[in-house]
Image: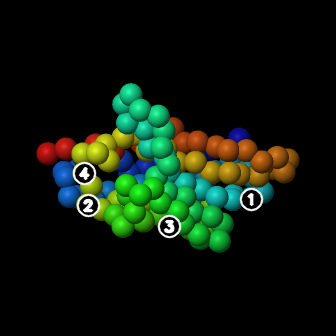
Amino acid sequence: QVQLVESGGGLVQPGGSLRLSCAASGTFSNVYHMGWYRQAPGNQRWLVATITKSDRTEYADSVSGRFTISRDSDKNAISLQMNSLTPEDTAVYYCTARIQGATLALGDYWGQGTQVTVSS
């Protein structure tokens, strides 16, 4: 069974920073691209940032220059460093990954989500 386990959410003041982490666990052959999405109340889930197996990154315009996604391929893990946070960044953040399982079948997996609240 493949799982994505997230950590690092919480409450932070505007202008502050948080770091989210996500690690894949279980039995699998390969982890391909990984990323973060976020969903605010009443809204759909939006892409925040992605990173490929070769460390190519992509960011939403709203977070470019403030957020940095990084990857530890040895640990099948990613992190999201979030700086200069604003109340508009408040959302549940979900980790996602495309993983090739032990049977070589590809699947898109999601973490359980971690709440990020930016408020004074």
Please report contact status of discs 4 and 2: CB closer than 8 Å, yes or no. Answer: yes
| Residue 50 drawn at (x, y percent) | 55, 58
Q: CA distance from mark 3 to mark 4?
A: 21 Å
What amino acid is labelled 2 in the image? Ser
User: What residue type is disc 4 on?
Assistant: Thr
> Residue at point 32% right, 47% down?
89
Q: Closer to the observer: label 2 or label 3?
A: 2
Q: Measured from the top left, where is residue 22 in percent x and y? A: 51, 53
Picture quarter with the C terminus: top left
- Left or right: 99 as drawn, with respect to 63: right
For numbered disc 1, what is the local secondary structure? strand
Please report whichever mark, 2 or 1, sits nearer to the chain's N-terminal start.
1
Mark whose residue sits in front, 3 or 4: 4
Name the element at disc 4: loop
C-alpha span from label 2 to label 3 = 18 Å
Lower position in the chain sequence, tag 3 or tag 4: 3
What residue is pinned by disc 3? 70
120 relative to 79 in the view: left or right: left
Amino acid of disc 3:
Ser
CB atoms at circles 1 and 4 under 8 Å apart? no
Foreground: disc 2 or disc 1:
2
* Residue on which disc 2 sits: 84
Q: Which residue is mark 1?
A: 30
The residue furthest top is 42
Q: In this rendering, which labeled residue sits more in front, label 1 or label 4?
A: 4
Q: Which residue is mark 4?
A: 86
